[in-house]
Image: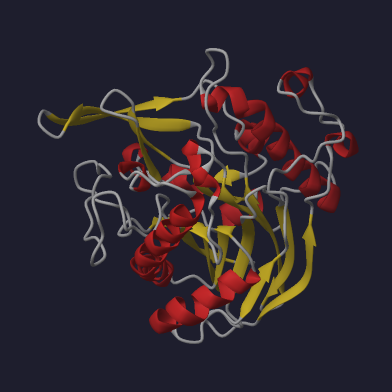
Amino acid sequence: MSLRLATFNVENLLTRFDYTGFRNQLRQDRVLKLFDVQNEIIYQQLEAARVVAATDDTRQMTALAIADADADIICLQEVDSMAALQAFEYGYLYRMVGNGYRQKFLIEGNDARGIDVAVMMREETRDGQPIVLRDIKSHAMVTYRDFGLFSDELAELGLHVDDKIFKRDCLELDLTIGGVPLSLYVVHLKSMGPGREGVDGRDSTMPVRRAETLGVRRIIENRFGAGHTAKKNFAICGDMNDYQERVDVIGTRHTGYRFKHRDEESSALDVFSKDGFAENVMRRRDALDRWTLYHARGPQEQWLCQLDYIWLSPALARANAARLPDVVRSGQPFRTIFPPGQEVERYPRTGWDRPKASDHCPVVMTLDLL
């Protein structure tokens, strides 16, 4: 039997307005910076109008990307609440796929902005096999002390031994697909913030993500037993906010572009790949065709990298050794630079920078379950 599994950061699927930009310029949308807003009441009116005007196109594209992934189970990141997920599924996704995702799960996590991980599932696979949730568990409350993961690096960042490991959550789902067990771990790791004391944002936040990946691995090893995980069916899905390789984009629109692949010296994701604990199946694709996000801060800092992952247990990876994951890139804005031969037709009304389905691309893979 087969299962189609996907992950997608839908970016700020909210049912509320965020007015903090009036006092925090870093949170203020760029278009409002063009206007002299005299007071907070006017700011709130303008911000609400801006969000409402932009959201419909954005969410139509988000729904199109999910429909194109055509997954039986899709793991989502940056979902505000169950109410937000239900409103999106009924108002947008239903128009694309009909009564597809009747099973929805979300447990509030630790994110200060209130964006959580969630899962949507069909009741059956396309082969007609029942998808059954046996148990669901949040690990949002696990601390560094609980797993013995506190370090000097974390202390230097101002963290404490009783702080929570996961900045959002590690959501664990115990499933059976046609009676075959599958454990699913859905995460959204610590984002790469601004640099600190001459260290770039990725490196300065690396200790937090490394503790998170160690935490995920510990949860899986506690579940199945350390040294006994390789023969189990499990997958780790989500936005990892880190990468082990990237493709540097060199050049400009006027001079043309060239693409240079490079491996990173270290990554928080080394915890998963170390000793074959899990396989990043995206690495089965060509080196220039593994990316799920385009990053740019001017022509001197632009690259393509993979932030969105499906990590498979050795057993699942072996059972699907001939399969490749797919990446849905039609929702990318026109500013995203594609290597030659990878260009796709964008969704209707996609903009240069926005509207867009997301800065991230859905990753989806059809899996045989044994």
- Residue 1 visible? The answer is no
| Horizontal relation, residue 298 to residue 48: left or right | left
Residue 52, position as x, y percentages in the image: 41, 66
Residue 65, position as x, y percentages in the image: 39, 65
| Viewer-side residue, 15 vs 315 | 15
| Viewer-side residue, 46 vs 86 | 46
Residue 37, position as x, y percentages in the image: 39, 47
At horizontal 33% and vertical 67% (from top left) the residue drawn is 57
- Residue 302 visible? The answer is yes
Residue 100, position as x, y percentages in the image: 51, 82
| Horizontal relation, residue 349 to residue 139: left or right | left
On the rendered image, what quadrant is the C terminus found in?
bottom right
Quadrant of the rendered image containing residue 335:
top left
| Viewer-side residue, 74 vs 44 | 44
Residue at the far front in the pictured view: 38
Residue at the far left in the pictured view: 254
| Horizontal relation, residue 15 to residue 246: left or right | right
Residue at the far top in the pictured view: 198
Quadrant of the rendered image containing residue 155:
top right
At horizontal 23% and vertical 50% (from top left) the residue drawn is 352
On the rendered image, what quadrant is the N terminus found in?
bottom right
